[in-house]
Image (tube, rainbow, N blue to C red):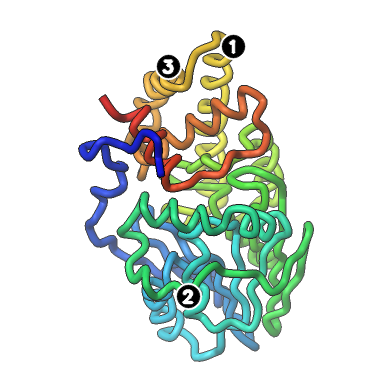
Amino acid sequence: MSAHPAPPNVAFASTGDLGDKTVTFAKLGEGAYAYTAEGDPNTGVIIGDDGVMVIDTQATPVMAAGVLEKIRAVTDKPVKYVLLTHYHAVRVLGASAYQAQAIIASRGTHEMILERGQEDYDSEAGRFPRLFQGLDSIPGLTWPTVVFDDRLTVDLGNRRVEILHPGKGHTQGDTVAWLPGERILYAGDLVEHNATPYTGDAHLAEWPETLRRLRDMKPNRLVPGRGDALMTPGDCEAAIAMTEAFVSDLFETAREGVALNQDLRTVYRRCRDRMDAKYGHWVIYDHCMPFDVTRAWDEARGIRRPRTWTADRDRDMWAALEGE
């Protein structure tokens, strides 16, 4: 039981985000699609001769049904693989809907599911109820059946998908899917487009170097974790640069505050004062910033491994930073 529960009038910013979003099923190339919904978590779809790969699943089987409907409009091939770009509940708990032959994740992602998957499930469902429609349809945690370290190649039949762990950033296990022929990159939450990076489980000092590796791949098209699919090399670079700027501004500002021995609430105000004008119009900015600054403050104080978020910790932090 939380020692300091949030006052009733202090609710997560996301609890007021209840309106329906317009879904787009964008075609990036032959057999390559992005399921996007105005800044909600994206899902990628790759179709080969032998079957389909789904990249991130939506948060519940009920919500995954919307993705399956779009897939079935373009192919009747079975979903052979589900790829988890990282461990967060909003990305993985719809997996059972696809009845895939294999669920793929990096070793770092598998470790996080083992260590804190249930806590993340409980925490995220409370933060953002609209993204967890049909919560009762979730059968439990999603467990990978194929775990890799740095690189894995999957053959979908006449289509090679390279699956890479380019480094730490959004989480310790971040994973991308790459179509080398078309230079199409499914980047997960390592890259956002006009949407606020959530950094509650981030490795902020390492994130820019991981983004450099993605930049060096020179993608022609890119599916971010949130936001519209990027359809030109220039737009891909712009999204990478926007994400890097946010992460760098956040961490540098937190480090300045820690160097002055400022407490969390003071560092939070410092970050908001510096960053609101530049980023405040981005999707889920108000929701993310308390979590983002808390992690940045921790890392700046030398806490290298992100602390586990729980439902109680969420509420206590939110009350401390957003309450009266």
> Is the C-beta separation of discs 3 and 2 under 8 Å?
no
Q: Residue at x 57, y 36 (%)?
A: 244
Q: Position of residue 272 (x, y in %)?
A: 38, 24
Distance in Å between CA atoms under marks 3 and 2: 41 Å
Earlier in the chain: of badge 1 and badge 2, it is 2
Q: Which residue is mark 3?
A: 266
Residue denoted by label 2:
139
**Numbered circle sitting on residue 60:** none
Where disc 3 sits, the SS reads: helix
Amino acid bearing label 1: Ala
Q: Nearer the viewer, mark 3 or mark 2?
A: 2
Q: Is residue 311 visible?
A: yes
Element assignment for label 2:
loop
Q: Amino acid at mark 2?
A: Pro
Left or right: where does residue 311 sit relative to residue 53?
left
Q: Say which residue label 1 marks.
A: 259
Considering only vertical position in the picture, is 107 above or below 284? below
N-terminal of the pair, mark 1 or mark 3, is: 1
Q: Amino acid at mark 3?
A: Thr
Between 191 and 298, which is closer to the camera in this rendering?
298
Q: As displayed, is residue 237 above or below residue 35?
A: above
Let me know if residue 221 appears in the view. no
Above/below status of 267 relative to 319 = above
Crowding near the residue tagged with mark 1, few <14, some 14–19, many ≥20 C-alpha atoms within 10 Å: few
Which residue is painted at 61% across and 29% down in the image?
Answer: 299
Furthest-bottom residue in this view: 76
What residue sits 21% from the left and 37% below the top?
A: 9
Q: How many marks?
A: 3
